[in-house]
Image: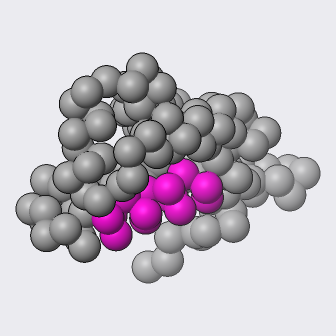
């Protein structure tokens, strides 16, 4: 159950919870920023990996722009929840693409799930309103 302050609003997170959330969110930001930069730079390794999972040639830059939009939304506190939602969709597509091609489960297929869990976990830990909306139950 979420604790409330005197005004009835969710209580601010504790300092360790807040910093754990910031670190998780920062890791997600760095991972997505690196992936986005690699796609926008049009690196040969990205083109090769995209071809390996069946993406048409030239789609990597389009995906990079979409990923950049998701990243910007996630990085801005007012739009972070929307950013987490659209990032989850993007990561779900990556999971489906890797699953379809038979890539290794724990390193490739589930990597998007790991990043998605870190994105939502970091946001949940640092946002009292999200914790009030999605409380953990015993």
Give the residues in magenta: 85-97
Q: Look at the picture and state if 52 lies above or below 122.
A: below
Q: Quadrant of the N terminus?
A: bottom right
Q: Residue at x 9, y 62 (%)?
A: 104
Q: Is residue 32 left or right of residue 104?
A: right
Q: Specify the quadrant of the image occupied by residue 101.
A: bottom left
Q: Is residue 94 visible?
A: yes
Considering every residue shown, the one lying at the far front of the view is: 57
Q: Position of residue 99 (x, y in %)?
A: 23, 70
Image check: 15 left or right of 20?
right
Asked if residue 5 lies left or right of residue 34, the reply is right
Residue 3 visible in the snapshot:
no
Percent across and percent down for residue 57 are 38, 45
Residue 114, how many percent across, how many down?
30, 54
Viewer-closest of 38 and 129: 38
Residue located at (25% from left, 27% from top): 44
Magenta includes 19? no
Is 58 located above or below residue 91 in the figure?
Answer: above
Q: Position of residue 7 (x, y in %)?
A: 90, 51
Name of the residue lying farthest toward the left: 104
Whether residue 116 is situated above or below residue 42 in the rendered picture = below
Considering the whole magenta stretch, tell me its main secondary structure. helix
The residue shown at (43%, 63%) is 93
Q: Quadrant of the C terminus?
A: bottom left
| Residue 87 belongs to magenta span | yes
Count of numbered marks: 0
Q: Residue at x 29, y 34 (%)?
A: 46
């Amino acid at each position: 159950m979420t604790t409330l302050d005197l005004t009835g609003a969710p209580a601010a997170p504790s300092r360790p919870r807040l910093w754990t959330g910031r670190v998780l969110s920062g890791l997600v930001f760095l991972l997505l920023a690196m992936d986005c930069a690699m796609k926008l730079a049009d690196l040969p390794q990205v083109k090769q990996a995209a071809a390996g999972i069946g993406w048409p040639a030239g789609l990597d830059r389009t995906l990079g722009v979409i990923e950049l939009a998701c990243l910007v939304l996630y990085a801005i506190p007012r739009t972070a929840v929307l950013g987490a939602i659209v990032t989850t969709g993007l990561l779900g597509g990556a999971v489906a693409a890797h699953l379809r091609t038979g890539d290794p489960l724990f390193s490739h297929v589930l990597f998007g799930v790991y990043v998605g869990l870190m994105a939502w976990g970091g946001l949940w830990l640092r946002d009292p309103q999200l914790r009030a909306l999605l409380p953990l139950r015993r």
